Image (cartoon, coloured by chain):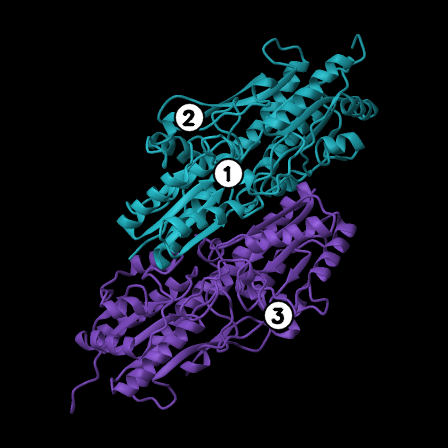
Chain colours: A purple, B cyan
Amino acid sequence: MKKKARRNNMVIAQSGGPSMVINASLMGAVMAAQEYHKEGKIGKILGARHGVEGMLKGDFIDLTRLSAKKAEEIAATPSSALGSCRHKPDAADCRRIFEEFKKRDVGYFFYIGGNDSADAARIVAEEAEKEGYPLVAYHIPKTIDNDLRSCDHTPGYGSAARFVASALIGDDLDNRALGGVKIDVIMGRDAGFLTAASALARTRPDDGPHLIYLPETVFTEDKFVKDVKAVMKKLGRCVVAVSEGIRGKDGVPIGATLGSGEKDSHGNIQMSGSGALGDHLAGILKAKAGVKRVRADTFGYLQRSFPAMQSETDVHEAKCAGQVAVFCAMEAAGGADDMPLKGTIGIQRRKGKKYDVEYAAMPIQNAAKFTRSVPKEFIAKSGNDVTKAFIDYARPLVGALPKTAVL
Amino acid sequence: MKKKARRNNMVIAQSGGPSMVINASLMGAVMAAQEYHKEGKIGKILGARHGVEGMLKGDFIDLTRLSAKKAEEIAATPSSALGSCRHKPDAADCRRIFEEFKKRDVGYFFYIGGNDSADAARIVAEEAEKEGYPLVAYHIPKTIDNDLRSCDHTPGYGSAARFVASALIGDDLDNRALGGVKIDVIMGRDAGFLTAASALARTRPDDGPHLIYLPETVFTEDKFVKDVKAVMKKLGRCVVAVSEGIRGKDGVPIGATLGSGEKDSHGNIQMSGSGALGDHLAGILKAKAGVKRVRADTFGYLQRSFPAMQSETDVHEAKCAGQVAVFCAMEAAGGADDMPLKGTIGIQRRKGKKYDVEYAAMPIQNAAKFTRSVPKEFIAKSGNDVTKAFIDYARPLVGALPKTAVL
C-alpha cells in the first residue's frame, strides 16, 4: 500500500419509525460487512444506538462478531433493534459526529430509514465533504408508508400492508356479525399506500373495506356521508378504511387539527398514537348519516411492529437492500465509477409477469426529503377506492393472506 | 314409539361480541349434531341469523348437510359466521320465537355467547316452560373477557389474550426504539383478564408492559402519574397496559364518562370503538408527568377478530364445548337425571401439573347475567401489575408466543 488506507471501520444505525423488517436490513448489512471483515476490507462493524443521537454521544455497540444465529433472530424481530430517533443533524452535530468517527477510524456510514433519514444521511455526507472527512455514506431504504421516490416499493411496506390487510379481513367479518359502520384509521401521513392495502382483504364480492379514503384525494364530509349512506343502503353495513392523513380542500390534514399539534425535528405533525380522527369521523356519521352503530379503531403502532407478521418477500428484500448497500459502498470506496460515494439503494420491479426486483445504487438525494404519493392510476375515479392496477402492484409484496369462509 | 316423539329439529345461534373461536364452537356443535342426525335423533340443524333477531324473523339457514371441509374452514374463521346481536328477548319476543320454532318442529336450542347471551337463553328456556313449549336449551360459553362464573376460563379468551400478548411484544420493542410512554387500551368492560394477559409478553427483565391497570383496582390519576414517573426514572421509557374499564373511587368507568354514552339492550355502555380513554390518559401524562412523547393506542376490535391468531388450546376447547353441549342436550332429552334441560357447559381445569380440562353440564343460570372478576390472588399488591399465579393460569390458554431478540 502506497498511502495510508481509508479508515475502514463502519457505523450503521436506524432512524425514524420502526418497521417489521428494518432489522432484516440491519442484519443483511452486518452479515455482508462480516464477509468484508474476513477479507480485511472492513474493520469493526459498529452499531450506533438511537441513530444520530448515539453517534453524537459515542454510544456504539460492536457487531463485528455477532453470530449468524443471533442475526437471524434479530432479523425476525420487529422494531429497530439499535433504537431509533427523529433527529435532524445540523453542521455542529456533524462536526461532533466526525470527532466520534475519527476516534473510531470510521470510513463507512450506513443509515436505515425513510426520507427524513435519507436526508439526515445526506447532511452527514455533505458536511463530511465540507470538513474534508473521507466518508462513504449509504442510506438503506425503510418505510411502512412506501413513499420513497427511489423505490418501486420500500422494505417495511409489505409487512405493514400485510398487517393492515389481515386486520381488515377480521374487521370485515366482525362488521358482518353486528352491522353498522366500522371505521379503521390507518397510518400514512402523506401517502395512502398503507390504507390502499386494506383492499387486499377482499375476496368475496361484498367483502369490506367498502370505502377507502387516501390523503391523495380531497376528503369532504358531504361526500363521506353520501358514500356511507349508499353502502349502508346496499349492504346494511359498511367498513371504511381511512388514512390518518386525509385532508380537506385546504390541504390541511384533518387529523392534524384534532391532535396535540406536536412536531418532530423534521417538522412532521404527530398524528398516530391518538384516536381523535376516528372518533371525529364516527361522530360525523352518527350525526349526519343516521347510522346508530358506528365504531372507529385506529390501528396505531401495531401495524408497524406486530411480531410474526413479516411478509416473506418484504423480509427478503429488506435483507438484500442491506447487503447491496454494503457492496455498493465498498465498490464506491474501491473507486468504481458507477457507484456514488453518497448513495441510496433503489429497488425497482423488473418487467414481466413474474414478480422480481433489482437493486441499484443511486445518488442519496433521490430518497431524501421529498416523498411520493399514490399515483393516479392506483386511485379509483370515485375517490373512495383503489384500482385493480393497485391490487396487482401490492399483492406480491404482501404475500398470501389468511383464508376465511362465510356461511 | 308410544307417543308423538319430541320435536327433534334444532336451532343454534350466536350472540354478543364475536371472538376468534366462536365459530369453532358453532362447528363443534353442528358436527356433533350431524352424528345424531345420522342416527335419526336430530332432524334438521338450523342456524339462526343474528341470534334472537333471526329467530324472531324466521331467518334460518340449514346446516344439516354442511360439509366437514366447510366446517373446518368456518371453525378457523374469526367472528360469528351466523351473525350476532345484542338483543335481550322479552316474553312477547319469546312467544314469537316459539311460533317460528313450532313451524319448524324445533325441540333443541343452542345459544353461543357470554353472560348476556346465557341470560337470553335462560329467558327463552323459562318462557318456553311457562308457555308449555317443550324445549331443551343450552348455552355454549364464549367471551373474550373471560368473565363467566361457570368456567375456569372461557373459549375466546385464549385467542384474544394471544393477540394482546403478541401486540405487547411488538409494542414494547417499538417503545424501546423511540422511548417515551406508550399506553395500550385493552378490552374488558368489568373484568381485567384480557388486560392482564399483556403480562405474557414479557420474557426479559426490562420487557413491558411495565404497568398494568385492571378494572378490579381503583385507578387514580395521582397513582398513575407516580407509577409512570418511577418507571421512566428507572428505564427511560414505559409501556402501560390499561383496561378500557378502569374506574375511579366512585366505581364509574373513566371511559364511560368520555364516550358517547351509548347503551345496548342489556344496559352495557359502549366503551370500545373509541380512542377517548387512551387520549385522556396520554393527556394526563403530558400535563402532569413531564413526559414529552406519549402515545396511546386502543386495540379495539382487532383483539377479538384478527385472523390466523387462534390459540390451539382455545380453538380445541371451543369445539369441545359445542360438542359437549349437543351431547348433554341429547342426554337431557333422553331423560338423564344429571343433565339439566336448561343448561350451560362449564369448563374446569383438572388439578395437577399438566394442563387439562373437563366439561360439565350446569344449570344455565350459573353462566347468566352476573360475571366474575379477576381474583385477588392474580393482582399484585402494588395495584399496577399481575402475579405469577396469573401467569401460570394464563400461559397454557395462550400457547407459545413469537420469539424476539434484542441487541
Q: Is residue A334 visible?
A: no
Question: Is residue A361 toward the left or the right of residue A296 in the image?
Answer: left
Q: Which residue is label 3 attached to?
A: A216
Query: Which quarter of the rendered picture does the N terminus of chain B lie within?
Result: top right
Query: What residue do we see at 69% from left, 60% from top?
Result: A221
Along the line of sight, the residue nearer the viewer: B401 or B381: B381
**What SS does tag 3 mark?**
loop
Q: Amino acid at mark 3?
A: Glu
Query: What residue do we see at 75% from left, 28% from top?
Result: B44
Q: Which mark is residue B254?
A: 1
Residues at discs 3 and 1 both on one chain: no
Q: Residue furthest front?
A: B287
Query: What residue do we see at 65% from left, 19% from top?
Result: B329
Q: Which mark is residue A352?
A: none
Q: Amino acid at mark 2?
A: Pro
Callout 1: 10 Å neighbours few (<14), some, many (20+)? many
Residue B20 image-quadrant placement? top right
Q: Label 3 vs label 1: CA separation? A: 37 Å
Along the line of sight, the residue nearer the viewer: B149 or A3: B149
Above or below A306: residue A153: below
Along the line of sight, the residue nearer the viewer: B29 or A245: A245
Residues at discs 3 and 2 both on one chain: no
Q: Amino acid at mark 1?
A: Ile
Q: Position of residue B3 (x, y in %)?
A: 80, 9
**Camera-side mark, 2 or 1:** 1
Above or below A365: residue A273: above
Above or below A90: residue B299: above
**What SS does tag 2 mark?**
loop
Q: Which residue is label 2 attached to?
A: B375
